[in-house]
Image: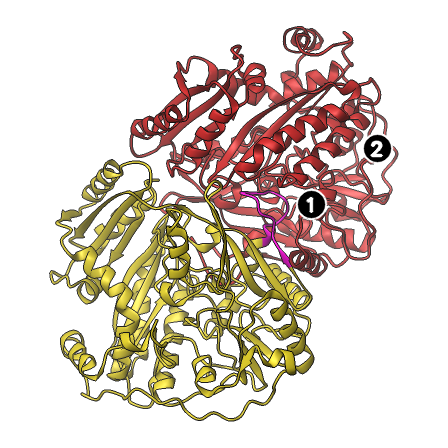
Chain colours: A red, B yellow
């Protein structure tokens, strides 16, 4: 694998070069938004201040203080991360990057960090888009990178489970499973650059648009190392013995412990598939059909509604109509009849099946390339970011209008393009995923985005949406998450945090404030 | 509705009379086990010691100290509860039975109980079979019966959710939903005599044999009153914002707060059904077929495997072969093709479809009548109880053998009948449900059962099973639950308990010991 980018998405050699950036701007942006014609150059690794702490001898071997590694671990991969890195800003780099190879290493690092007052931020694959891997306190911190915990230690075809260490990346996991004709079928957009541990810690969203699809549902058990001890949850297919222990660590975002391994529910690879694309004359019809499908029990594997702008930008659809990408898959039985039922439901709601042609293919291509294109757009001087939520079906139209209005009102010059797709749909509501594109004043991109983000997040909260469906809370969603968290659960989570992380070293500022620490610093 | 039994299951007029008990014994028991011909008479409500505490004036109106009410709230409905009540033993009756009508009533009762050092045990519908509603400490306690919180306050057909207060019983909920052509499709065996709040507090098992079926999956949000405050979780179809808050209270069994309402995911009533019964020449074939089905993605609504003894005892099957009861249902589309695929999977594994005839019907009849029959068998002097778990597919055969061996070794005279069915099946393992029948020495039934239960639970734990799949922990499963609970989660749960119930008044002895209290008393 070629070198990872320190400032942007993925691999260096997969990024768009300057000419490709310009071509993208002309083709995909200028029809909609103004461009100043400049392409921000790829930044060099800045020179960083020396580390303020260093662990003692045996632990020092697990850590690097190399500037490139520290810069690469300073941020996640949100727009505001890329924009800052492109501007040569690395505000609070980690003092060191620790790469433990065993649970004992992790426990030793936590002990040292607790004694030395060093914050510990689990890095996962570094693809956080919510400030989850970026410490914003003033003190010393280490980024804990688990890539050396990279083994798939068990593949159990009889019970359809596999145990992967936290640092296993998506492609490595699937390669291992493929040898046994198995698959996890878990493909977040970050698949190539995110890890099992990161998926579990952030409750990653899954491949399937319906049914059990989040990593929450695919985790049979997990292992965790905390500052007060390590443990693993029971390996059973289901249990009614008390509150589900794994659910407390799913979504804990590194604040309660370091997830070191997970037993994952795997399945046979699909052999039967069927797909269709439906177009709709108006929004009401597209929503009615999608809701009917979500409530039908048919459980399509793909049920991605693209609004007309999203269809245009991401799938090359030029007729100004919404598209629903429908798919079914099974390892065991043909699914054509299921697709037929689903198409019939869409037809009854006013939809028309169109030749699949390249809509689905074009969309999938865009999906995987999107983060690279995002980096190119940022270099062209644009704000480009996504915001996601989940809400009740009947609240979505007003929520959508409020998000568009908020984004435009907050955007520089009052101009923003806001498209949406549904990534997942549930009987009780959709998970809308908004893409926001706006021109940014050069040099003030981050502040401009923070204005938009704040306004849009307020709009989401005001219309009954959660602050995040699958991007997690991190630091950037704290204000809204704090409001969403219910009183008794807030008290319970604070207590759990204090019990497991009594010195408050684990990812401070994420989810919840550690005991005896002030509120998280506001985003820089 | 006619009067509820104070000592046994359900309604007084639905219980078997003495003659029916005798007939049942001759027909269903004597072919297998000896009977002494005696039928324990139905007990009168014993005279109880006067209550040791009484709340002050306004709260006193919410409570009763009537002997019948106190006796009826002293126990749940396990074998050991019925056996003790039949023997006239009401060991530790509640000092009072409080029936709050509002959340404010509950908060006021918790305040008073905290001040007065009175333990509070939420009663639900009183159908606990694990000692969940029976306080075993020495001090004063109140049983909190929420039957006055009996309203279904919202039915939302658009988003397919309904809000029910905690004291709503199964039939009332379904009657409300039926008026809107909706249903929860949640039918624990206790359906008629259990409540929404009880289902949520104990993670009740659901109607469907596969897929999302536990009440966990059907709860969109819940409201809870704790000694330190009340709150409700966010009402969204899904969220990735931190650990799922509702999951901490699902399964909390009254130890973290009193659940007062739940938003439940409802669905349209099924219009299409298809069913088949499969027989198998041997156990290996039946397990292979059931595992293949569980891993097929077909998601049958019914996939209940009855071993030969269970098929004989519960469904009148006389050929000594196992039966698999298969069913599919849908509100939207025909399911015959799905059933066809499922039958084909069974055939490939060695099964034969048999005319459905009355196997399924006979089994369903037995299922609903079973608790009444249980009471009759107890009056005949038998031990009759169920034990359930979930385990990996490949561990089940050894677990099964160990359970049978343990039950027989511990049973008086070395004789016990042990049958099983699978209530639910998962890709990673089945949920076996054992029924144990043994002759008991008159007067020592409870001690004899406790021996069996202990031996069987040890066998389950030794073979990788959870101590409970859907009966909850209560007090009777504490020893094994304590061993199952992982270190970090144990610390987190203790901390949450201390934060939400600082005076340790909520259901002490269940799940976890409150701060500053000794271990739970051993079962009486």
**From the viewer's perspective, is residue B267 above or below residue B382?**
above
Relative side of A95 to B124, left or right: right
Query: Which residue corresponds to the image point at 74% horizontal and 55% vertical from the top-left?
Result: A111
Name which quarter of the figure residue A274 lies in: top left
Relative side of B423 to A252, left or right: left
- Whether residue A130 is visible, yes or no, is no
Q: Position of residue B60 (x, y in %)?
A: 60, 81
Chain identifier of the residue bearing label 2 in the image? A
Q: Position of residue B455 (x, y in %)?
A: 38, 74
Q: Residues within 10 Å of mark 2 (few under 14, many from 20)?
A: some
Q: Is residue B242 magenta?
A: yes
- Whether residue A46 is visible, yes or no, is yes
Q: Which residues are magenta?
A: B231-245
Residue mark closest to the camera, 1 vs 2: 1
Reading the chain from its start, which is encountered first: label 1 or label 2?
Answer: 2
Q: Nearer the viewer, residue A284 or A81?
A: A284
Q: Which residue is mark 1?
A: A481
Q: CA distance from mark 1 to mark 2?
A: 24 Å
Q: Position of residue A508 (x, y in %)?
A: 76, 47
Q: Which residue is mark 2?
A: A91
Q: Nearer the viewer, residue B17 or B209?
A: B17
Q: Which image quarter is the N terminus of chain B in?
A: bottom left
Q: Secondary structure at mark 2?
A: loop
Question: What is the count of numbered marks?
Answer: 2
Query: Which residue corresponds to the image point at 51% horizontal and 93% vertical from the top-left?
Result: B49
**From the viewer's perspective, is residue B418 above or below residue B299?**
below
């Amino acid at each position: 694998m070629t070198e990872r980018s320190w400032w942007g998405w993925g691999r260096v050699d997969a990024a768009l070069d300057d000419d490709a950036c310009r071509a993208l701007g002309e083709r995909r942006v200028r029809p909609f938004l103004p461009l100043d014609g400049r392409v921000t150059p790829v930044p060099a690794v800045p020179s960083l201040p020396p580390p303020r702490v260093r662990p003692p001898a045996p632990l020092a071997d697990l850590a690097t203080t190399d500037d490139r590694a520290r810069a690469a671990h300073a941020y996640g991969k949100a727009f505001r991360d890329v924009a800052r890195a492109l501007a040569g800003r690395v505000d609070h780099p980690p003092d060191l990057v620790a790469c433990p190879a065993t649970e004992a290493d992790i426990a030793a690092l936590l002990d040292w960090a607790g004694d030395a007052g060093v914050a510990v931020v689990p890095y996962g694959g570094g693809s956080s888009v919510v400030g989850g891997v970026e410490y914003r306190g003033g003190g010393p911190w280490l980024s804990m990178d688990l890539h050396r915990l990279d083994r798939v230690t068990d593949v159990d075809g009889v019970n359809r489970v596999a145990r992967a260490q936290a640092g296993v990346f998506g492609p490595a996991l699937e390669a291992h499973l493929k040898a046994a004709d198995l698959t996890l079928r878990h493909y977040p957009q970050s698949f190539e650059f995110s890890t099992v541990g990161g998926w579990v810690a952030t409750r990653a969203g899954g491949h399937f648009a319906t049914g059990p699809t989040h990593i929450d549902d695919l985790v049979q058990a997990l292992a965790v190392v905390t500052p007060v001890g390590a443990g693993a949850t029971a390996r059973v297919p289901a249990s009614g013995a008390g509150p589900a222990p794994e659910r407390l660590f799913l979504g804990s975002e590194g604040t309660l412990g370091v997830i070191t391994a997970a037993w994952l529910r795997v399945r046979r690879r699909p052999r039967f598939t069927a797909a269709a694309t439906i177009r709709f004359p108006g929004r009401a019809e597209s929503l009615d059909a999608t809701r009917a499908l979500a409530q039908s029990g048919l459980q399509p594997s793909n049920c991605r509604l693209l609004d007309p702008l999203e269809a245009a930008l991401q799938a090359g659809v030029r007729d100004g109509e919404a598209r629903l990408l429908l798919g079914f898959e099974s390892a065991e039985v043909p699914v054509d009849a299921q697709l037929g039922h689903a198409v019939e439901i869409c037809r009854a709601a006013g939809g028309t099946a169109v030749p699949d042609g390249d809509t689905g293919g074009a969309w999938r291509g865009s999906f995987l390339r999107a983060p690279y294109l995002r980096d190119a757009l940022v270099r062209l001087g644009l704000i480009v970011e996504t915001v996601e939520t989940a809400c009740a079906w009947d609240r979505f139209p007003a929520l959508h209008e409020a998000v568009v209005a908020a984004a435009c009102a907050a955007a520089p010059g009052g101009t923003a393009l806001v498209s949406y797709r549904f990534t997942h749909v549930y009987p009780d509501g959709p998970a809308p995923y908004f893409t926001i594109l706006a021109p940014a004043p050069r040099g003030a991109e981050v502040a401009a985005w923070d204005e938009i983000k704040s306004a849009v997040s307020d709009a989401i909260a005001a219309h009954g949406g959660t602050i995040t469906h699958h991007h997690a809370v991190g630091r950037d969603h704290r204000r809204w998450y704090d409001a969403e968290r219910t009183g008794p659960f807030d008290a319970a989570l604070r207590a759990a945090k204090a019990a497991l992380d009594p010195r408050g070293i684990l990812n401070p500022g994420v989810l919840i404030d550690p005991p005896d620490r002030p509120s998280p610093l506001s985003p820089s």
